[in-house]
Amino acid sequence: MARKILLKFPDFEAEVELLEKDHPELCEAIRSALPLEAAIDVWKEEIYFEIPVQMKPRKPTTRTTAGDVSYWPDGPALCVFFGRSQPVGPVETFGVIRRGLENFRRLKAGDRVRVIES
């Protein structure tokens, strides 16, 4: 069974299924940084927030799909893609949100998120 982390916003929660088989080092680094809390930023159809993880991506990509949860090393930040926008630079996608993406459209810059193990 896949491990998960939880993104808790003021009025909803989103469960992230970790892709540990493909990204074991990154998933472990992110889990080790939990719990954490941050203010989000919004860019096109993506939210992102700074996280205390410094890693060089092992499988960087510039293509994402809605539901992808990625690490952006230039932030360093955790990014959630909820629409058709693409990352501004290479990211490593380490998780996926299977349902509830429509809730992300309500978020505004400055909203708070708490990230914990699920």
Image (tube, grey):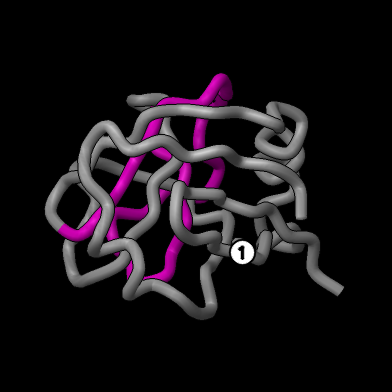
| Whole-percent x, y for residue 95 in the image | 57, 60
Compared to residue 41, the image places residue 63 above or below, namely below
Judging depth in this view, the residue of 58 and 1 nearest the camera is: 1
Judging depth in this view, the residue of 81 and 64 nearest the camera is: 81
Within the magenta stretch, is there residue 51? Answer: yes
Q: In this image, 87 relative to 60: left or right?
A: left
Q: In this image, 67 relative to 27: left or right?
A: left
Residue visible at 19% across and 60% down?
45
Residue visible at 66% across and 66% down?
17
Residue visible at 45% across and 48% down?
10
Residue interval drawn in magenta: 45-73
Q: In this image, 95 relative to 109: left or right?
A: right
| Whole-percent x, y for residue 59 in the image | 51, 50
Q: Which secondary structure dominates the residues rendered in magenta? A: loop
| Whole-percent x, y for residue 26 in the image | 65, 41
Q: Quadrant of residue 111?
A: top left
Q: Residues within 10 Å of mark 1 (few under 14, many from 20)?
A: many
Judging depth in this view, the residue of 96 and 15 nearest the camera is: 15
| Whole-percent x, y for residue 61 in the image | 37, 54
User: Which structural element holds mark 1?
Assistant: strand
Can you name the residue that lies furthest to the front here? 11
Tag 1: amino acid:
Glu
Q: In this image, 34 relative to 56: left or right?
A: right
Total tally of numbered discs in the picture: 1
User: Which residue carries the number 1 mark?
Assistant: 15
Can you name the residue that lies furthest to the right here? 1
Within the magenta stretch, is there residue 78? Answer: no
Judging depth in this view, the residue of 66 and 72 nearest the camera is: 66
Compared to residue 68, the image places residue 92 above or below, namely above
Q: Quadrant of the C terminus?
A: bottom right
Residue visible at 73% across and 38% down?
31
